[in-house]
Amino acid sequence: MYVEHQFVNPHVFFSIDLDNPANLRNAFRLVIDLGAVGAGSTTIAHGLTIGLTWQFTRIYGVVNNTTTGNYYPIPWASAAGTTNIELRIDNTNVVITNNSGLVFTTCYVILEWLKN
């Protein structure tokens, strides 16, 4: 399920408790709609209160231009290695740095993490 609020997704991860290997950990997911992404940096608050024990397991997304019909995964790097779209998060924001020279009408970012 991909929704715009934090929820426990169906993935579970290995135990970090050596005495109890069956103690699997729940994974959480959040989808963020960033809307249009132009050249340069786009920043939007993710709304999470990231705890000290959190570990992100996946950070990915997609941008597209509905006019031209072009779709790109993010992060993305051109085959020539001269342009890229960088995706990162910090304790407050999702940050996309678009060095591709392209303008996108839609951007979705998916965050997945463990809380312990």
Image (cartoon, rainbow, N blue to C red):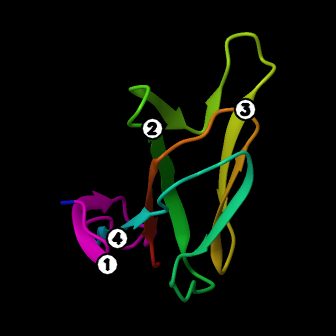
Question: Mark 3 is on which residue type?
Answer: Gly
Name the residue tied to disc 1: 5
Q: Position of residue 21 (x, y in %)?
A: 32, 65
Image position of 11 (left or right of 54):
left
**Which residue in the protein does label 3 denote?**
101
Type of amino acid at the residue the image marks with label 1? His
Question: How far is the residue under mark 1 from the one under mark 4?
Answer: 10 Å
Of the two numbered discs 4 and 2 in the rendering, the one whose residue sits closer to the viewer = 2
- The numbered mark, 3 or 2, whose residue comes first in the sequence reads 2
Nearer to the camera, 103 or 34: 103
Labels 2, 1: front one: 2
Mark 3 against mark 1, which lies toward the viewer? Answer: 3
Residue type, label 2: Asn
Residue 64 numbered tag = 2
The question of residue 8 being in magenta is answered with yes
Considering only order in the chain, which callout, 4 or 1, is on the residue closer to the N terminus?
A: 1
Q: Which mark is residue 28?
A: 4
